[in-house]
Image (cartoon, rainbow, N blue to C red):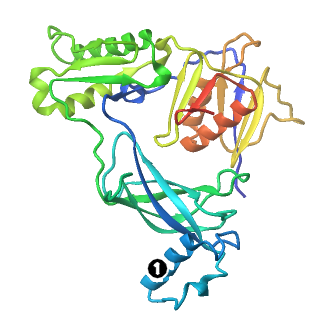
Amino acid sequence: MNSVRTIFACVLLIVTAATQAATVRDFVRIRGQGESVIQGVGLVLGLNGTGDGGDEMATIRPLAELLRRNEMPVASLEELANAKSAALVMVTCVVPREGAKPDDTFDARISVVNSASSLKVGELYIAPLNEPRPGGSVYAFAQGMVTIEDEENPTTGVVARGVRMVRSIQTTPPIEGVFDLVLDNWYAGWTSAHYVSSQINDTYHLDTNPSVERIARVVDDRTIRLVVPPEERETYAAFISDVMQTLIDPKQFGLPAMVIANTKTGSIVVTGNVQISPAVITHDDLVLTTTLPPPIPTPEQPLVESDRWAPVKTAANQQEMARLDDLLAAFKQLDVDPSKQIQMLRDLHRSGSLHAKLIIDGSEG
């Protein structure tokens, strides 16, 4: 039997500070560096009568070609007139701003093109993905089982890690003596920009020569301009890596309470004092229970029976709510997968128990 792991958010008389290991990389991008989209058209096979009908020539023709390439040619397209197990789909993949190398894998998003009513139980046949321009080169191939994310909209789905790159996508622009860091939209503000700039300058000068001119300055509320020191220009990649690893405390941004999560990287960033109301959330083999004040266990009614337990502590005032920082620390202690953490945060937000704006992959969750 699978054990159930229970995480408590209880009011205790001890205050603990949960630290977050956040770096500049979590909040900025290099100007000119952005996400890329590759796309293609493919066939989803194995549908249980929910595919395109036999009168959809745009589907029947590539299906016949697929059979021909696999040495099973059809004499006439009319032979496929009753084929409802296939659907013509658009396949897209967003390559993150860090770029991609051959054999990297990413998720593919699938959307019905014609009249198929559902992609449930379907499998995407091997589809080449190109850059989005006429005659674009093939950068990857997509293939795999389609997962329906929204049961009310079964004509779209995802193939998890179904895209495999065959060519590199380079997203970092050429860098010479000067380059700009751009804060992500959610962190924009003069306070944020000045704080990041100061952290970069202070860290660089502590680690190198304090007499060197400061390397970072604020241009506007989203832009920080960096000057690559002359001695670093032959190895600018190492310099950029050092800058991106500068430690950052997002609490210093002076922003309202927000939780920003990235499902691709698994990162979760908290700004402001994010609190949690009493709630019970269940996800897979995890149960999240926040109780204010905590119940007193007795032999007849023990607090809980579980194989793994982690307290989430708040301030001494029993009217205060649990702190999200401490919940994330409990997640880390129990080695909870980032995808489950993000899903439970989504559940807390939907239940009204997460008192903050929740941003997942750039969209409010």
How crowded pointer 1 is (Cα within 10 Å; few <14, some 14-19, many 20+) is rated as some
Amino acid type, label 1: Glu
Could you tell me which residue is drawn at 14 percent across and 8 percent down? 211
- State the quadrant of the N terminus: bottom right
Q: Is residue 210 left or right of residue 325?
A: left
Q: Is residue 108 left or right of residue 151?
A: left
Q: Residue 337 in the image: state x and y as whole percent.
A: 55, 44
Which is nearer the eye, 94 or 3?
A: 94
Q: Residue furthest bottom?
A: 75
Whether 62 is drawn above or below 302: the answer is: below
Could you tell me which residue is drawn at 78 percent across and 24 percent down? 294
Q: Is residue 276 visible?
A: yes
Q: Residue furthest right?
A: 300
Quadrant of res 115: bottom right
Q: Is residue 44 left or right of residue 149?
A: left
Quadrant of res 57: bottom right
Could you tell me which residue is drawn at 76 percent across and 42 percent down? 305
Q: Which residue is mark 1?
A: 65
Q: Residue 276 in the image: state x and y as whole percent.
A: 70, 23
Q: Is residue 224 left or right of residue 37?
A: left
Q: Residue 144 in the image: state x and y as whole percent.
A: 52, 65
- State the quadrant of the C terminus: top right
